[in-house]
Image (cartoon, rainbow, N blue to C red):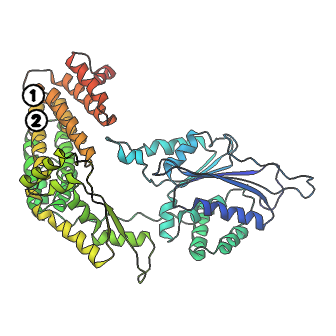
Amino acid sequence: MTGKAQDRPFTLLIAALGGEGGGLLTDWIVEACRHEGVLVQSTSIPGVAQRTGATTYYMEAMRAAPDADREPLFGLYPAPGYIDVAVASELVEAGRLVEAGFVTPERTTLIASTHRVYAMDEKTAMGDGFYNASRVADAANALAETPLLNDFQALAKAERTAINAVLLGAISTHPACPVSVGGIEHAITGRGVAVDANLRGFRAGRALIAGEIDLPEAPEPAKAETGTGALHARAERFPADARDVIHAGIDRVTDFQDDAYGEIYLDRLDAIAAADAGPGGRHDLTRETARYLALWMAYEDVIRVADLKSRASRLARVRAEADAKHAEPVRITEFLKPGVDEAATILPAALGRRLTRWAEKRGLSKKLHLPLHIRTDTLWGYTLMRLMAGMKRRRRKGLRFAREQDMIERWLCAIPKAAQNSYALGLETAECGRLVKGYSDTRERAFSNFDRIFSVIVEPAISSDADGDTVAHWLRDARTAALADEDGKALEDVISAFEAGGTPHTAQAAE
């Protein structure tokens, strides 16, 4: 409809995350409208910090008839059922637009990038807090008149530009867009912001929607450089349906510590595989234990953080994300805030315990922190981080290492015994490895929940003739409750019901 009078405004709603240029995207369209004499009005509603919602930009534009005696009255806020084009720079933000009713099958073209930027609720969940991306995509495809879902972020990276320019190209293909391609290119040029890159991204976005180009193929994941061939050869003796997890686990634990630590990983799995007689020839017990054992053995501490942050591959990735040229400097500042616990856990066990007791007596355990701002782009900062990373040779003597290994052994010893009672109980006991995650206060809560569940449910069951299948249902209820409620009330409710001889919820659901 470009260049023609319209009988109603063109409505555009954009949901963009911080740093993705949603404001600039809106400004480009507004400036193009003004350049071509199109009446336009735009508003923005700021989102909130820490990725709990995007900033939304709403625009109405209309090319009025030459004989119109008055200008149209535009709306300030989007209304369900009234949106021509809805744009989301990330998949779950598209889900928010759909959920709010802004995407309708009678009118709305939904332009959304299918890549994910995880929200804080997803990152901080004690269990699996990730949103089901496939369900969001299914809803978007079902409820939009014209769904245009593509990995626009991948295309932006391939074109070495920002995602807002690619999305602008997609918007411009809508039949009701009130401005021309030339008008938009004039706006991009007039703003003077990375003109060449933004024009390139704009044209790529148009070409993608037109089917003139395909999305770039995702690069193959880098092959792990850790874990000796002997360890991987030994892994081939494990059941075939568990080997992929075990190979990945070897790479993870040897990268965390060394090849000897990888041998310990496989030694521990030998006992589990010997007790694994799953139904239908499956080996879920071995597979799930291998998964959570690798994660647990490669726990996060200040040594691990320093190692990951100072790796050459990580520094190269930061430069690439900043789109820095070969001779351009990139300043990288790492923000660390270690406390007494972090310091104590890397000290020799006896010294660590003394420091912990000293801090507890003075009430400093949760108060004493050392904020550090370390620039890893400098020789001094990088050297300091590498020195911290090099402490992994002394990790085995540390208080944290000893505590983690004790808890791991307690868990691993219970799994074969539980499987002797009931395979379902053994598998649920292995799944208790999911409880242990995070660091600092999160880790403490995880250990507390783990200890509570093992003391009350698991260990009494494997030392008695309790019905394993029923206990497995209780164990699943307890694990689910612990992961859903960081305050612990839900877990205590399950334990109270268990001790009172009630019926587990998962058993009721199965019936």
Badge 1: few (under 14), some or many (20 or more) residues near its Cα, within 10 Å? Answer: many
462 lies left or right of 480: left
Which amino acid type is marked by label 2?
Ala
Q: Quadrant of the C terminus?
A: top left
Q: Residue at x 47, y 41 (%)?
A: 135
Query: Label 1, on which residue?
Result: 462
Residue 192 spot, x, y in % from top left: 63, 75
The residue lying toward the viewer, choosing from 166 and 38, is 38
351 lies left or right of 112: left
User: Is 359 situated above or below 24?
Assistant: above
Residue 258 spot, x, y in % from top left: 12, 62
Which comes sooner in the sequence, label 1 or label 2?
A: 2
User: Is 81 situated above or below 345?
Assistant: above
Residue 467 spot, x, y in % from top left: 15, 21
Q: Quadrant of the N terminus?
A: bottom right
Badges 1 and 2: C-beta atoms under 8 Å apart? yes
Tell me the SS state at disc 1.
helix
Residue 101 spot, x, y in % from top left: 61, 39
Q: Residue at x 22, y 59 (%)?
A: 302
* Location of residue 206 (image quadrant): bottom right
> Which residue is farthest bottom?
327
Query: Label 2, on which residue?
Result: 414
Which amino acid type is marked by label 1?
Ile
The residue lying toward the viewer, choosing from 281 and 501, is 501
> Which residue is farthest front?
362
All told, the count of numbered labels is 2
